[in-house]
Image (cartoon, rainbow, N blue to C red):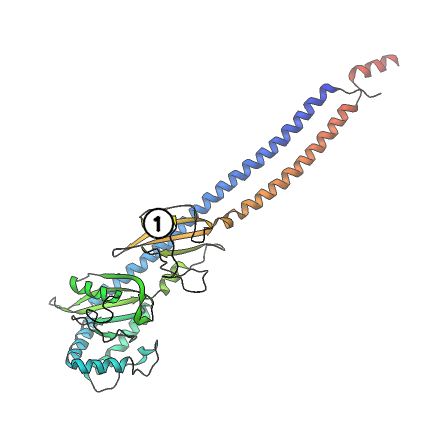
Amino acid sequence: MAVSDKGSVGPVVSTVGLVLVALAGVGFLVYERAGDQLMEDTGEKYVALMQLRRDALQRYMDRVSSEVTYFAGDRNVREILADLGSAWKRLGRKGRIKIRNAYVEGNPHPVGERQKLYSARDGSAYSALHGAHHRWLRRFLEQHGYYDVFLFEPGGDLIYSAFKEADFGTNLVGGPYRESGLGEVFRTAREEAKPGSLAFSDFRPYAPSHGAPAAFVASPVLAEDGRLLGVLAFQLSIEPIDQIMQTQTGMGETGETFAVGPDGLMRSNSRFADAPTILSRRIETTQARHALSGWSGAGIFDDHRGIPVLAAYGHLDFLGTRWAVLAEVDEEEILAPIRRLRNFLIVSIVVAMVVVSAIGGVVLSWGLHRPAPQAERARRSVG
């Protein structure tokens, strides 16, 4: 008859239990450490991506300011402004209305292609000079990627624009667009009237461009004797900004970088949106407020959709205007590999528990059913 050795059962059960607890503990520690490390690495990555986009955007804005000040002092621009300004004055009020009609309403090319008209051929000195200078100015516009280029005479008349929108020929001091961003930069540049001075107006809807978002930068054009000849202004295109902010390299499936203005509206278009988001999507998140306050950092926040994201934030300052620059990715995407690791660890631990339990059960069964040492000695002595 088998005799159980109850003294050997307790250590076996304890050992099996300890092994199972140890397996679960190791799995939990691996899961926690891997999650923390992944969040830390992703945070560093998105901080770097935010800084790259911000620095690229800063270089673009610095290039804009350098170009407008350089060309405001360029001899060609001074000569063009002096020529057109002199011819504009000689036109008189009726002649200016006629010129405006010839290049805007009477332009044979449709809206968006009016820059193709080099000369109205109306016999005026202005049109002759426009035909001579427009080719160079149009080529400059295309090479440097601006939406439009403008020349003002000191009184505020817009005597040249490449695209001949509704603002051409109007006065930006007392005319219908005096409160626009273009009117603001003209007046600021005229009041400064110093070499290298700059004026900037942030993106906002601009009526002559059919309400599209427009930003302007301007600088005074001075003669060699310091006399004010007028003002040179550029209308910025959104495309270079989008090319910087919509770069997908390193962003994953849900990651994106974008800019936000002090009014809380986007200053670039989302890579995920079918319609433009600049000036139409409001971003009033904690991370955007931090950046607009001049802070930089990263963390888990809710985005404008109310979805948790890892967000890296910083800011860019340009001629008195601050933009927030953010790089965000859904937390769900970051945690996906950790959740796969968690599931793998759970399966592995369960399998290990089953194996260890089975081994422990065999050992325990063997311990319960084998003869006790005393009984074995008694059996041998009897034999």
Residue found at the very far right of the displayed protein = 383
In this orientation, does residue 26 appear?
Answer: yes
Q: Nearer the viewer, residue 91 or 220?
A: 91
For the point 17% across and 77% down, the residue is 83
For the point 46% across and 45% down, the residue is 41
Q: Position of residue 127 (x, y in %)?
A: 23, 82
Please, is residue 147 above or below residue 17 in the view? Answer: below
Q: Position of residue 122 (x, y in %)?
A: 23, 86
Residue 382 figure quarter: top right
State the residue position of label 1: 289
Q: Amino acid at mark 1?
A: Arg
Q: Position of residue 333 (x, y in %)?
A: 51, 50
Please, is residue 120 above or below residue 277 in the view? Answer: below
For the point 26% across and 66% down, the residue is 180
Please, is residue 219 above or below residue 109 in the view? Answer: above
Q: Secondary structure at mark 1?
A: helix
**Quadrant in which the C terminus is drawn:** top right
Q: Is residue 123 left or right of residue 381?
A: left
Q: Is residue 179 left or right of residue 313?
A: left
Residue 167 figure quarter: bottom left
Please, is residue 337 above or below residue 239 in the view? Answer: above
Q: Nearer the viewer, residue 192 or 146?
A: 192
Q: Residues within 10 Å of mark 1 (few under 14, many from 20)?
A: some
In this orientation, does residue 194 appear?
Answer: no
For the point 17% across and 65% down, the residue is 190
**Quadrant in which the N terminus is drawn:** top right
Q: Nearer the viewer, residue 267 or 265?
A: 265
Numbered circles on residues, count:
1
Q: Is residue 156 left or right of residue 361?
A: left
Q: Position of residue 148 (x, y in %)?
A: 29, 70
